[in-house]
Image (cartoon, grey):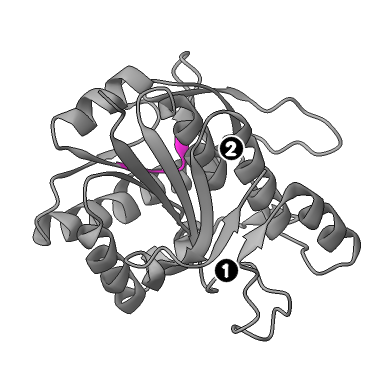
Amino acid sequence: MSAQSLIIVKVGGKIVEEPESLQRLLTEFAHIPGLKILVHGGGRSATAMASRLGIESKMVDGRRITDKETLEVVTMVYGGLVNKNIVAGLQAKGVNAIGLTGCDCDTIRSVKRPVGAIDYGYVGDVKAVNAPFLANLLNQGIIPVLAPLTHDGKGNMLNTNADTIAGETAKALASYFKVTLVYCFEKPGVLRDENDDNSVIPYLTRADFKQMVADGVIHGGMIPKIENSFNALASGVKSVLITQAVNLDKLSGTIIEL
């Protein structure tokens, strides 16, 4: 019997934090047929909550420095507020979702990032995804909604990049299902001109990517997103798409190819 198809959708915090875009995402995601997983961010909500609590948010190159106080905030916000709002919204649309952090049923285990030029604090690098557990949930018709939090197996929660969680989960489940990984953000795909939403690059190979990075066409946070995409494809993921949350029914955008 051939493997079933699975779509893993990663959405950024900006999409899930605004009521209008969240509702649009939930509607689009609910209409995806078959097996699916949602991975979400929530950085702006964490920053806003930290500010309300008088905790300064420190960022380096777009990545959050997670000290002890910040870890408490992101655990509350990602694993609680943002995750449960999404799950409740999906239940309202008939999707039997379950919200999970990495520590729940040992779903995702990681190690604290070693201190290099920058000490990121309580940030985790993924080491293991509990693929049998997630496959079992999916086969029971339960849709996992993964928050960007993992654990180290020693009682410590760790803040973990949501793009990485989506990529590592896709790789781990590639031996169980035909996996399509979809990275959603505010634009309709990878753009040749970031100011022109009609300049979507329909297909992107590794050679194209290297050239466009050298030319400055692709830069910033899009670089690690695309690198995650190539790593996923090299590890057995069937296809990777970068698109907008409003394109989930058509799955149009930029297709990443090796």
Q: Check the picture and name the quadrant holding the N terminus.
A: top left
User: Which residue is depicted at the point 29% across and 73% down?
Assistant: 24
- Does residue 27 appear left or right of residue 202 in this picture? left
Extreme residue in the right direction: 214
Residue type for callout 2: Leu
Q: Which residue is mark 2?
A: 233
Residue with the mark numbered 1: 189
Residue 76 visible, this angle: yes
Q: Is residue 133 left or right of residue 172?
A: left
* Residue name at image x 83 percent, y 53 percent: 210
Looking at the image, residue 65 lies above or below residue 111: below
Residue 250: percent from left, percent from top = 36, 67
Q: CA distance from mark 2 to mark 1?
A: 18 Å
Visible in this render: residue 122?
no
Q: Secondary structure at mark 1?
A: loop
Helix, strand or loop at disc 2? helix
Q: Give yes or no for contact between labels 2 and 1 (Cβ–Cβ under 8 Å).
A: no
Find residue 54 and report its horizontal and vertical position in percent.
53, 60
Which quarter shows the C terminus? top right
- Nearest the eye: 227 or 144: 227
Considering the whole magenta stretch, tell me its main secondary structure. Answer: strand
Residue 165 in percent (x, y) is at: 50, 38
Boundaries of the magenta span? 145-149
- Foreground residue, 23 or 114? 23
**Relative to 173, is 54 on the left or the right?**
right
Identify the image quadrant of residue 249.
Answer: bottom left
Image spot of residue 218 (x, y percent): 77, 64
Q: Amino acid at mark 1?
A: Gly
In the rendered image, which quarter is residue 27 located in? bottom left
Total marks drawn? Answer: 2
The residue that appears at 22% across and 46% down in the rendered structure is: 34
Q: Is tag 2's residue or tag 1's residue first in the polypeptide sequence? A: 1
